[in-house]
Image (cartoon, rainbow, N blue to C red):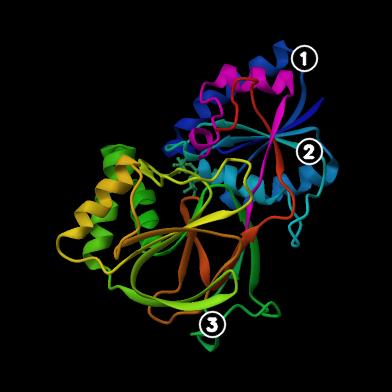
Amino acid sequence: MRCLLILNPGSQGGKSKAKFERIFAFLHKNRVKFDYRLTKTLDDAYTFSLAGNKKGYDVILAVGGDGTINRVISGFYDLQGKRISNSKLAVIHTGTSPDFCKSYNLPLEIDQALNAVLEGKTVQIPMAKITYLSEYDEKLDGKPLSLAHEKLQTSYFACCANIGIGASVARGANNGIRDYLGDFAGTLVSLIKALISYHPVNFSVRIDGKQEVLEKAYNIFVGKTTYIASGLKVKNELALNDPRLYGLIIQKLGLVNWVNVLKKLYSGDEFANNAAMSLLYVHKMEIFGNPANNEIEFDGDPRGFLPCKIEPAGEALDVICPQDGLLR
Ligand SMILES: Nc1ncnc2c1ncn2[C@@H]1O[C@H](COP(=O)(O)OP(=O)(O)OP(=O)(O)O)[C@@H](O)[C@H]1O
């Protein structure tokens, strides 16, 4: 077995790197052949993963937070959503909020995750493909994505994309506040601050080909997993091997019902669709360009601009998983 480790020393506010020696020692002790690369930026995690896939490593092991894991996942795919290689993805979460591992029942404990690498068992996990713009283009305001656009960007995600308030919540939560308030409280403070300053927006969307306007929207979650951000949970019926996505639309919040919406999202309880919160299941979600709010966030970081198209990647990833880490 040849293994490539992609390690982010900056995850969890820099605490991540204290765990690297233990990982190296485990692999040496068990005579695993490995190479490793240390990231300087999150983009490096993508570049190293892409190169590792092209070289055909048996296992590519992401060591970092969900942002690092997200970039490593994108390196497994070409622009059409096809896998580049037969490499397997393994993950050791050394970040702040382990939404990916919690959602897919993957071990958080380092030795357990490394033992799973030795055993080599995998589960197939479908990923979402997101196509969007790397720069805002006002010519596409009110319009769907043009696949011929020169700033077109393709990425992949495992947890959730957010359009609306998501980018400003992520920016607030990632600016160091979680290092001193903790993950849960830091993200909650950032969410409430963003809610107070947010102006709801009408978004034109196409849901599985059907066009409509989502009025006074606060956030459109397009996701796959229950755990989406530092304690926020979306109760949904997707099995973890279901390639579809859920869409959760939060809109028309008044002075009273935003508290109820937050309670539902933090409890992860089931809810009946109502004027403020509606959950649906989709194969393809397109969100048109929007001059009032055009930012896109996914798997925890602001990443680009509307318009966007979100759909299942053509092929699932083989993710290293202990035998008892079964899909729900
Ligand atoms: N050497 C580095 N390589 C990559 N990113 C770095 C580095 N140093 C600092 N960073 C910053 O560290 C953060 C790492 O993000 P990552 O998602 O991996 O961890 P996290 O934010 O602690 O955890 P989580 O996303 O799971 O909550 C990014 O904001 C990135 O800009």
The residue singled out by tag 3 in the image is 137
Disc 2 or 1, which lies upstream in sequence? Answer: 1
> Of tags 2 and 1, which is closer to the observer?
2
| Residue 269 position by quadrant | top left
Q: Is residue 298 visible?
A: no
Q: Residues within 10 Å of mark 1 (few under 14, many from 20)?
A: few
Nearer the camera: disc 3 or disc 1: 3
Quadrant including the C terminus: top right
* Foreground residue among 53 and 140: 140
State whether residue 137 is above or below residue 155.
below
Q: Of label 3 and label 1, which has the lower sequence position?
A: 1
**Looking at the picture, does residue 65 appear above or below residue 150?**
above
Is residue 253 a member of the stretch shown in magenta? no
Which residue appears at 82% of the width and 40% of the height?
A: 86
Tell me the kind of residue under disc 1.
Arg
**Label 2's element?**
loop
Residue at 52% x, 21% y is 109
Observer-nearest residue: 232 or 299?
A: 232
Mark 1 lies on a secondary structure that is loop
How far across and how far down the image is residue 189, in percent? Answer: 24, 49
Find disc 2 in the rendering and name its residue.
87
Residue at image mark 1: 31
The answer for how far apart the CA atoms under marks 2 and 1 are is: 19 Å
Side of 39 where 234 appears, left or right = left
Q: Which residues are magenta?
A: 100-129
Residue 293, image x and y in percent? 40, 74
Disc 2 residue type (three-letter): Ser
